[in-house]
Image: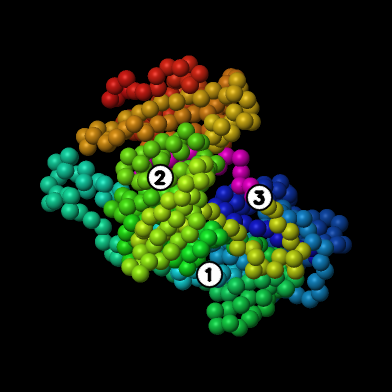
Amino acid sequence: MSKRIRNIESDEEENYIYWKIKKLKKQARRSRRARKGRHGCRAAPPADDATDADCSNKKASQQTAPKDKLEDPEILEILGAAPAIDIKYNGTFDYDLAVIGGGSGGLACAKEAVNHGAKVAVLDYVTPSPLGTKWGLGGTCVNVGCIPKKLMHQAALLGESIHEAVSYGWEVPSPKDIKINWSSLTEAVQNHIKSVNWVTRVDLRDKKIEYINGLGEFKDAHTIIATLKNGSKKELTAKNIVIAVGGRPHYPDIPGALEYCISSDDIFSLGYPPGKTLVVGAGYIGLECAGFLNSLGYSATVLVRSVPLRGFDQQMAHLVTAEMEERGVRFHHKCVPLSVEKLESGQLKARWQNTDTGEQCEDVFDTVLMATGRYALTKALNLPAAGVTQNLCSRSGDIPRTTVFTPLEYGCVGLSEETAIARLGEDAVEVYHAYYKPTEFFIPQRNIRNCYLKAVAERAPPQRVLGLHFVGPVAGEVIQGFAAAIKCGLTMEQLMNTVGIHPTVAEEFTRLNITKRSGKDPNPASCCS
């Protein structure tokens, strides 16, 4: 018996598992229909001594069929894409499948395995953050990631809407005095998260999936030792094991980082208003946190080591940060942190250095939030005991789609302009672009300078679309449908021939007709054009 182990650490891989298993189910149904006999009886898998597959042999043949649904090699390939490890194991296993990690990927895998008749266990344990923050079942997305981030973003948008309501005729008493109650906000967010934690546990129980609240490590390729909350240890065996441990925030190796700073693990349940905040890092987590903090009324400053939103289309990243600067967020570019010191007042003095000039600066903040990347939680797994090696990099598909929930959102799918040119060459790439005016911005006279979109396409007919990029309101909702279109081979002709729904911001993609190569002005000619 061979062992396969798979490391699942992203929503993209979770979606792939869903798609692949559904595809296999469909293929299996077709195969069974093709094997049906004249009288409507399905041909059973041949037993060792079987000579035919008539109806009289059906019962006997079924008894010889493998009981473990996860013996299907293609299912095993989904649950474990790593090369098989030739480790023999005598005796029976406690589970057909054990999943280490109770986040989005791990839970999806466990539930699909149960649908195939497997006996499944899920191990999940949250090591407290340096500040001491802990959370329940569900992983990063539910507890300290996508969900609370989107709720904080929504709170910020509501605050903006209240101020804009006056221009639409609403009588709002003293809109300048409107402010957020941080304690009420975090309480509401945490109450929702706890309800999701509870529903998740009930769902596992209903599906007969055993939940083990323990930190798992390998004893060998089929054995896991779980350290439980009370310190006791539990040993379990499984025929198949999936690693879905996810990641945690990285702290820079500088004085005071671990002692005095927080991360995205802490901000959504922080027991006090963050006040004047320094965000170290300009990836999507850093910009999202700085964005909603600024919109909620707290001063926000961002240290940018290299470029903002590294890995994203840099023209769009510039528009995102330009909008944030116009709203009051401060940026220090080409800067790295040096130290964080706690003052007698309880405030934090942060020092940083400009990597171009060598100049050192310092300022005093109420909160310092580290957003300098994430690392995989594989160190405690004792992977060598299972014969598992690690890759230094990861891969999550050729058509990534995501949204950065900054004050003016950025949604994208497919290749950035830089990546497309690097792969195909500048002469082989055509970029269609336009600025636009969201209708909802007219009356409150909001800034529209950074509302922009572009399509990156092959230059040669039929001009297959390689990537779509959109900065503006509700970018996530806009880009979602286009992700499916690109996977289906969307071309620029098809996009231009689509009749848009008016008035929406999404229709702007169907009106793209100006290329960068032409040099024509991409600004709208009128309020409705």
**Crowding near the residue tagged with mark 3, few <14, some 14–19, many ≥20 C-alpha atoms within 10 Å:** few
Q: Nearer the viewer, residue 200 or 320?
A: 320
Above/below status of 169 relative to 145: above
Residue 255 circle label: none
Give the magenta range.
Answer: 393-412
Above/below status of 148 relative to 231: above
Q: Quadrant of the N terminus?
A: bottom right
Residue 116, by quadrant, is bottom right
Could you tell me which residue is drawn at 50 percent across and 56 percent down?
Answer: 338
Q: Earlier in the sequence, mark 1 or mark 2?
A: 1
Judge depth for marks 3 and 1 and give the one in front: 3
Q: Earlier in the sequence, mark 3 or mark 1?
A: 1
Q: Which residue is mark 1?
A: 126
**Residue type, mark 2 in image:** Phe
Q: Which residue is mark 3?
A: 393
Could you say where residue 65 lies in the image, as x and y percent from the top left?
76, 63
Judge depth for marks 1 and 2 and give the one in front: 2
Q: Which residue is mark 2?
A: 331
**Crowding near the residue tagged with mark 1, few <14, some 14–19, many ≥20 C-alpha atoms within 10 Å:** some
Looking at the rendered structure, the secondary structure element under dot 2 is strand
Q: Earlier in the sequence, mark 3 or mark 2?
A: 2
Could you say where residue 114 lies in the image, as x and y percent from the top left?
61, 64
Q: Is residue 196 visible?
A: no
Could you tell me which residue is drawn at 37 percent across and 33 percent down?
Answer: 451
Could you tell me which residue is drawn at 37 percent across and 46 percent down?
Answer: 330
Residue 273, by quadrant, is bottom left
